Amino acid sequence: MKRILTGLLVVVMLAGVGAWFLRGDLAIRLMERRLAVGMATNVVAGLPDGLHVAVCGSGGPFPDGDRGAPCTAVIAGKRLFIVDTGEAAGRTLGRMGIAGNSVVLLTHFHSDHIDGLGNVAMQRWAGGNLPTPLKLYGPPGVEQVAAGFTQAYVADSSYRTAHHGEGVAPPSGAGIEARPFAFPEGRDSVVVLEEDGVKITAFKVDHGPVEPAVGYRFDYKGRSVVISGDAAPSPNVTRFATGADLLVHEALSPRLVGLIEKAALKAGNTKRAKIMNDILNYHTTPEQAADIATKAGAKVLLLNHIVPPLPLRALEGPFLGQARKIFAGPLWIARDGDLISLPAGSSDITRKRLLR
Ligand SMILES: [Zn+2]
Ligand SMILES: [Zn+2]
């Protein structure tokens, strides 16, 4: 009897080991299939003509396992623009399958909006065999950001050219070229780019003491997207979002940030508590964003720069407060991996996921 039981145990163990090896084989086959599909897919080229918004970072500066720091990609026709490059921007764009000869636009120079810039520039260059540097648009001060990141990556780009050759990593394509724009005397907006049917307008927003800070409006073939950037409620956002198809607006919940302040005070961390109190005055609540979208007559409101992090889905209700009652149209809380599409020649606005 004992011998039979031992035999059975050996058989079960061998079967387990066999299944374990088989599991590895299956995983390798799945990986091969995924790679074949991934290599053959160009998400940007495959999109229908129109405007598309890919959320490559829907969080703010807080550590957040679900949301990367601010990054919003706008695809207009076949052109790829990236508004802000927060930490993880390059990796999230890569996971979404979004690549190409991108142009970056910065809303302002707070660390959470630029700390992924080096990686975005490197990925564009090393992945695309491009002979010219990344173009970086922004208000005055953008020159310093471009020069600093370029300098920090001098060694990295030289290694890559030495390792892969000038044919794959041409030195002329490394680094970042600043394209600063200024507002004409007495004006608070300026067209920063008009090419291939795409018009991008920058407008001033209120994010004091951060100055300058801007939002952007994209127009392409009758469709429009407005991105507020970081801002307290700003009349210019309402003005430039008038009649827009999609308003992407930052949002901060004072109620939830207040919980962090309370916990910090309880733990004796008065500096952290002060910061939580300070940040309330240069951001916008979800309810205020809903009011702006309503006044502007925007068709859809997408909230991004979600502060604080929402580790539980059930916190979305308290985060929004009364916002859904204020704005009658679709109101979405952005998640990394979202793709919002506004096809040309249509009034459709659809949302799907590029990340599971
Ligand atoms: Zn920010
Ligand atoms: Zn900011």
Image (spheres, grey):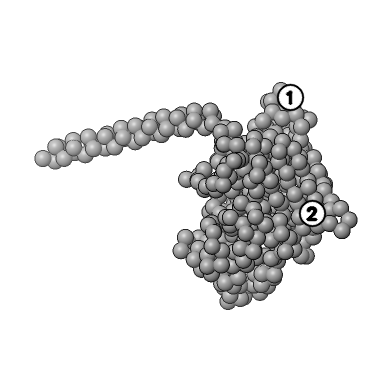
Q: Residue at x 68, y 46 (%)?
A: 219
Three-letter code for the amino acid on which mark 2 is drawn: Ser
Q: Residue at x 76, y 51 (%)?
A: 202
Look at the numbered disc 2 and give the secondary structure of its residue: strand
Q: Residue at x 60, y 37 (%)?
A: 49
Give how far apart the Cα atoms at labels 2 and 1 are.
41 Å
Q: Position of residue 229 (x, y in %)?
A: 69, 56
Q: Residue at x 86, y 53 (%)?
A: 184
Q: Position of residue 85 (x, y in %)?
A: 67, 48
Three-letter code for the amino acid on which mark 1 is drawn: Glu
For ligand 2, tell me if the residue under mark 2 lies within 8 Å: no
- Closer to the camera, 187 or 158? 187
Split into 4 quadrants, where in the image is the N terminus?
top left
Name the residue carrying label 2: 189
In the rendered image, is residue 250 in sight? no
Residue 38 against residue 150 in the figure, above or below:
above
Residue 336 against residue 303 in the figure, above or below:
above
Callout 2 crowding tier (Cα within 10 Å): few <14, some 14–19, many ≥20:
some
Evaluate if marks 2 and 1 touch, with contact meaning CB atoms under 8 Å apart: no
Q: Position of residue 58 (x, y in %)?
A: 59, 53
Mark linked to residue 180: none
Residue 64 against residue 79 in the figure, above or below:
below
Name the residue carrying label 1: 166
In-image side of 274 versus 171 (left or right): left
- Closer to the camera, 21 or 299? 299
Of callouts 2 and 1, which one flags the residue occurring earlier in the amino acid sequence?
Answer: 1
Q: Quadrant of residue 102?
A: top right
In-image side of 24 versus 214 (left or right): left
